[in-house]
Amino acid sequence: MNRGIRLAIALLLSGLVGCPAGDATDGPTPVVRIASTPECRVVGGGFPSGLAALPGAAGRAAVVRFGIGELAVIGLDLNGEPPTPLAAAPPPPLPEVAGQSCPGLRVDSDSNGIADSDDNFAIGLFCGIDPQPGTLLPLAADLVAVTTSGYEQILFVDPQDGTLRYVQLDPSPAGPAFDPADWPLWPDAGTRPFQSGFSTRACVYGADLVDSEGDSVGVESDCDPGRIGFFTSYTSDVLRANGRLFVATSNLLPVRGTRFAPGTVLVFDFDEGVSPPRAAPVAAGAIRLTTGYNPTSLAAYTTPAGRELVLVGLTGALTGAGDLLTRSSIDVIDATSLELIATIPLGFAGLGFDGFAIDATGRIAVIGAVANRALYAIDLAALDDPSLGLGPETLPIILDGMTPGFRDARVHDASRPFALPKRADGPLDSVCVPQTSVAIRDDNGFAAATEYCDGTITRIDLTLPAERTTPLDPDTTLRVDTVFEALAPGDAVFEPRFPGDVLIRPGTPGLDYDGPDVHFTFGDPEGGVCGIRIDAI
């Protein structure tokens, strides 16, 4: 999820009391191991906003360093103990140009020759802070896409040295389903400039659009003042599927305190068959409204029949007191037709910000929590029906077991979360709000979940049936095995704490690589990445 949203939500959640999630298992008490983790690399800044493995580069990953007024992507060699930066020199600063409307604000992150703040000012927004980095999507060993907020965009970076990379922007001319005026920071059709980023600021319209408290979103004067609508904001995640980039925007309405406009998923054609890649909003269906509020995570799923789908994790709106105001859910978009075909209601779960973990067989998708020491999960086999969303049923189809002819996709929802054990000497939930992230090893050997406040990593065993028609049993599919006290608890001082994103190296420890098999980010006293041996010797 975009660090700009993390920062906003962190402010909203100050003082939040976490909700207990129940027992993780009715089996034996998990083993607790104290894990010394000297294999930590400080990258600086605050809480790293993203960590991901680089494709086609064994043992390499990229991490996003976060700080107000700074944005850096750092490539890491995970074979080192601690992880070793790929480049000897630090990442270069973002380019700057002289600001006109916003003196002193010079960053030109998208390399279009205009200061980012001047671009924002030109479309009616206030002069703001520099772009705040968020999640990252590895596209190649030498190319990652990074979300930014404040200046809403997808930025392209080479993780090997942190330099910006260019894409060609080639938007369509005006047509029946595409109005260039709705994309005010995109270039005119036919100009085809090369830039290091493209804008995710767009105008969204709808007569029935209401905010997360049920009031009309009103009129955005800098879009079409004659229509009810809003500007997209808080770019939260980016995903590649079916030759396109799907981008989630959470759409917090800052002038209304903690209210959210409806969530959106923006869709861009992205041609990687040319150099540099070519990008443009799709000519029809470039803006998809979600069924709920605050979409923060995206994931791709391909059914056994080859149908490409996009999962959209909706955290739900949060009040200023930190309470969940709206329910969480997972929307399902057909990556070809761009129709929102199904939704999976999960109740007041508060889905986490760090994305989905999908097992190697494509049977289960697991996601963390933003305000609970718990995980949530859905059965992906419920999406395998090739007729899903193509029949006479009203869309989206609700996959809660109550729609005739369609399966219940829920395994762990708010009524039955998969709870993680609490650390005995960890801080009270009233002092530190629990948050979780999860990853699954590529051979389904185990899952690993971090817990932010306790400083723990929990190893979780997976038991999946051989037949996709066999329902997943919430009592046996996931089971806690071992809890590793990897970092100091959240109330410690002057020690690494607050684990976040988690990554499990593919392959067999001791055969394919030496060293730690699990890596995770931490956020205090400075941001960094640690390695820990869970299955490795």
Image (cartoon, rainbow, N blue to C red):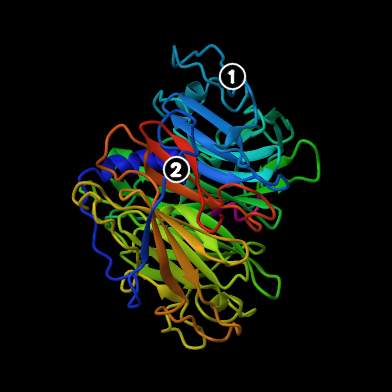
Q: Secondary structure at mark 2?
A: loop
Estimate how packed mark 1 is, as few (under 14), some (14 to 19) or many (20 or more) residues with alpha carbons within 10 Å.
some
Where is residue 146 drawn, in percent x and y?
A: 56, 39
- Left or right for 401, reference 254: right
Where is residue 7 drawn, in percent x and y?
A: 36, 38
Residue at x 56% of width, y 22% of height: 94
Is residue 230 on the magenta stretch? no
Point out the tag, 1 or 2, that comes first from the N-terminus: 2
Is residue 284 on the magenta stretch? yes
- Left or right for 455, reference 509: left
Q: Amino acid at mark 1?
A: Pro
Q: CA distance from mark 1 to mark 2?
A: 37 Å
Q: Secondary structure at mark 1?
A: loop
Residue corresponding to mark 1: 95
Q: Is residue 342 above or below residue 64?
A: below
Q: Nearer the viewer, residue 35 or 15?
A: 35
